[in-house]
Amino acid sequence: MGFWDTVGKAAKAVADGSKEFNERRAQYDEEMSSKSDRELARIVVNEHSRSPLKATSARVELRNRGYSDIEDVKRLV
């Protein structure tokens, strides 16, 4: 029974991590909608390695605003 207890604990940990990820992503998505194009471009360019989730949310918001090419984003900075 110890094996299945361990499997259950591991599954719970994965589910909890996934929930936190989704909550954080939703928070970033909401935050990005209020930022200017220039602020979003700075996040995409400067914070990608520190916070890839934040940079991805910023990139998605810029795409929604019509900046489909990364070169367009870099020109904003």
Image (cartoon, rainbow, N blue to C red):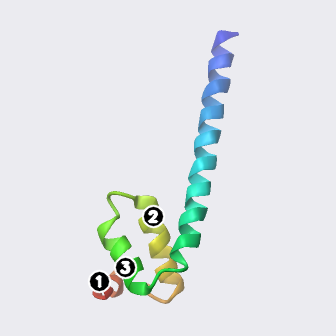
Q: Amino acid at mark 3?
A: Ala
Q: For numbered disc 1, what is the local secondary structure?
A: loop
Dot placed on the residue nearer the N-terminal end, 3 or 2: 3
Q: Amino acid at mark 2?
A: Lys
Disc 3 and disc 2: Cα gap in Å?
12 Å
Q: Nearer the viewer, residue 29 or 10?
A: 29
Name the residue tied to disc 2: 54
User: Residue at point 59% right, 71% down?
Assistant: 30
- Name the quadrant of the C terminus: bottom left
Question: Label 2: few (<14), some or many (≥20) within 10 Å?
Answer: many
Q: For numbered disc 3, what is the local secondary structure?
A: helix
Is residue 63 depicted above or below 13 in this figure?
below
Q: Are circles 1 and 3 on residues that touch, CB within 8 Å?
A: yes
Give the numbered dot on residue 77.
Answer: 1
Q: Position of residue 5 (x, y in %)?
A: 67, 17
* Left-right relation of 51 to 75: right
Q: Position of residue 50 (x, y in %)?
A: 34, 57
Q: Position of residue 8 (x, y in %)?
A: 68, 25
User: Residue at point 39% right, 58% down?
Assistant: 51
Q: For numbered disc 2, what is the local secondary structure?
A: helix
Question: Label 3: few (<14), some or many (≥20) within 10 Å?
Answer: many
Name the residue tied to disc 3: 41
Residue 69 in view of the camera = no
Q: Are circles 2 and 1 on residues that touch, CB within 8 Å?
A: no
Q: Amino acid at mark 1?
A: Val
Disc 2 and disc 1: Cα gap in Å?
17 Å
Instruction: Point out the residue furthest to the top here.
Output: 1
User: Residue at point 56% right, 57% down?
Assistant: 24
Question: Label 1: few (<14), some or many (≥20) within 10 Å?
Answer: some
Dot placed on the residue nearer the N-terminal end, 2 or 1: 2
Disc 1 and disc 3: Cα gap in Å?
6 Å
